[in-house]
Image: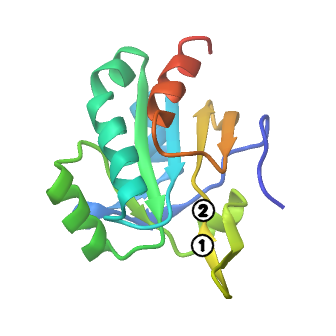
Amino acid sequence: MSVTVGSPAVDFSLPTSGGGTLSAADLQAKAEFVIIYFYPRDATPGCTTEAKDFRDLAPQLEQLNATVVGVSRDSVESHDAFVKDLDLNFPLITDDGTLTEGYGVWKLRKLGDKEMMIVERSTFILRGGKVVKEWRGVKSTGHAAAVVESLKSL
């Protein structure tokens, strides 16, 4: 069962870019709003666009008392390279399935003649340990700006 608006946030403690670990409690302590965005894979075109957009919107997110974290099933080493290449100002979590399955974004997709499991591009805003907004199956272009606009009304 995946979370929906009003559900408690999924609890976790997972490795991140930079070699540390991050928990749900750590994120909630950073800001009133926590933006968790899920993406399929480091260094792919859509994922690069989305990461850069969240990076560039960091000043607005800070003004709105929000923090952001990206999540995929890529390795810490892959995340470290992605963070360095894009000069990202937020951490990337290496998920073991806790978050992607807990939020219901680990999906079976048909790619050509093959079926495979991938992370569905999705975003959740958390406040006070609960999901207050969700987007599923989003397009990368312009999505980060839509998240910022939505935060303004929460």
**Residue at figure coordinates x 36%, y 58% from the top left:** 45
x%, y% of residue 135?
66, 40
**Residue at figure coordinates x 48%, y 45% from the top left:** 140
> For the view shown, which residue lies furthest in the bottom direction?
114
Residue under label 1: 118
Circle 2: element type: helix
Frontmost of labels 1 and 2 is 1
Mark 1 / mark 2, whichever is N-terminal: 2
Residue under label 2: 99
- Quarter containing the N terminus: bottom right
> For the view shown, which residue lies furthest in the top direction?
153
Q: CA distance from mark 1 to mark 2?
A: 13 Å
Image position of 15 (left or right of 152): left
- Residues marked 1 and 2 touching at CB (< 8 Å): no
Q: Is residue 71 above or below residue 36?
A: below
Labelled disc at residue 56:
none
Residue 47 seen in the current view:
yes
x%, y% of residue 50?
40, 45
Near mark 2 (Cα within 10 A), the count class, few <14, some 14-19 or many ≥20, is many
Circle 1: element type: strand
- Quarter containing the C terminus: top right
**Residue at figure coordinates x 28%, y 21% from the top left:** 59
Q: Amino acid at mark 2?
A: Leu
